[in-house]
Amino acid sequence: MGNDTDLADLAQLILNVGRLVRARTPEGPEVVPMTETERHVMRAVDLFPGASPSQIADRAGLQRTNVSTALRGLEEKGMVSRRATAGRGVAVHPTERAAANLRTLRAVWARELAEALGEDLGDVHRCTALLDRLERHFTAAR
């Protein structure tokens, strides 16, 4: 039972720390505003460039209709491009604007975490590896 408590504590902390980091993300012309669903879709597009909308929905754990709505919004914001593939398929790719936006966000997040964690990156590397493993598990094709 102790393992269940430890794992539940980890999940709770991941959710809360993510929310707190998001709350410190700047707003303004340097950052493209996105809805929560658009952020999830954008992460899937960044991880799997060229994925179809159905693949994005599957990997992000979202409803296909919600992904379609988010993709329309992201396309209007210049964050993604959709290209026809063989047959009637569509491949979704991040744009340069999306890459620039992500660079801005990552710089802010790095400063925020450096302020909280300091220079010792040993634990950061171990934590990053663990969270990467979890993300890969949860975004694996079903």
Image (cartoon, rainbow, N blue to C red):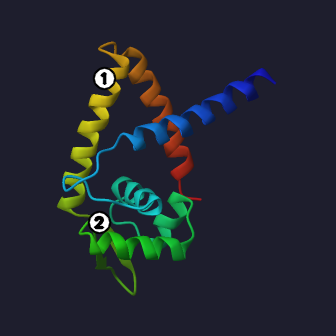
The percent coordinates of residue 106 (x first, y second) are: 28, 40
Q: Is residue 142 above or below residue 66?
A: above
* Residue depicted at x 18% and y 60%: 96
User: Is residue 126 or residue 108 the one in the foreground?
Assistant: 108
* Residue depicted at x 40% and y 87%: 88
**Circle 1/circle 2 CB separation < 8 Å:** no
The percent coordinates of residue 131 (x first, y second) are: 49, 34
* Residue depicted at x 50% and y 43%: 135
Q: Quadrant of the C terminus?
A: bottom right
Q: Is residue 91 above or below residue 13?
A: below
Q: Which mark is residue 114?
A: 1
Q: Which mark is residue 93?
A: 2
Q: Quadrant of the N terminus?
A: top right
**Amino acid under disc 2:** His
Say whether disc 1 or disc 2 marks the residue closer to the N-terminus.
Answer: 2
Q: Which mark is residue 44?
A: none
User: Is residue 26 or residue 34 the one in the foreground?
Assistant: 26
User: Is residue 132 or residue 114 the one in the foreground?
Assistant: 114
Locate residue 69 relative to residue 5 in the image: left or right. left
The percent coordinates of residue 40 (x first, y second) are: 45, 57
The percent coordinates of residue 87 (x first, y second) are: 38, 86
In the picture, residue 45 is in which quadrant?
bottom left
